[in-house]
Image (cartoon, helix red, strand yellow):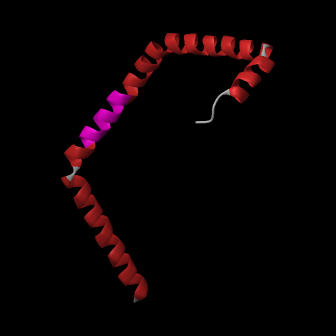
Amino acid sequence: GDQSDQFGKAVSALSELVDGLESRGQDISDGLAYTNAAAGSIPDLLSQARPPLQKVIRETDRTAGIVVADHEYFDNVLNTLPDA
């Protein structure tokens, strides 16, 4: 009956999926290889970016300290700038 038809459709759909995956096997393999290579390069990228980022963070912290210490002056500067 109805369950048998549903099971038959599920088996057919699964068979189509397996056939599709088989025909795209090389594409899937290439995609996994590229993903693996990209994952391997992320730590290298982060290790190269770390020193410049540390400097930017230090300088941002220093600048924020200056602005906070003299906030009245900076408030005045911002309030007197012309509107864009």
What is the number of callouts on the image? 0
Tell me residue 68's x, y (percent).
77, 17
Position of the N terminus, as image quadrant, is bottom left
Question: Is 20 on the left-hand or right-hand side of 70?
Answer: left
Question: Is 54 on the left-hand or right-hand side of 20?
Answer: right
Residue 28 placement: quadrant? top left
Tell me residue 35's x, y (percent).
34, 35
> Magenta stretch containing residue 54, yes or no?
no
Between residue 39 and residue 10, name the one nearer to us: 39
Tell me residue 61's x, y (percent).
67, 14
Residue 4 position (above or below residue 24)? below
Tell me residue 43's x, y (percent).
44, 20
Q: Residue furthest bottom?
A: 1
Residue 48 placement: quadrant? top left
Between residue 71 and residue 55, name the one nearer to us: 71
Span shown in magenta: 29-38
Between residue 60 and residue 5, name the one nearer to us: 60
Which residue sits at x=39%, y=80%? 6
Question: Is 46 on the left-hand or right-hand side of 28?
Answer: right
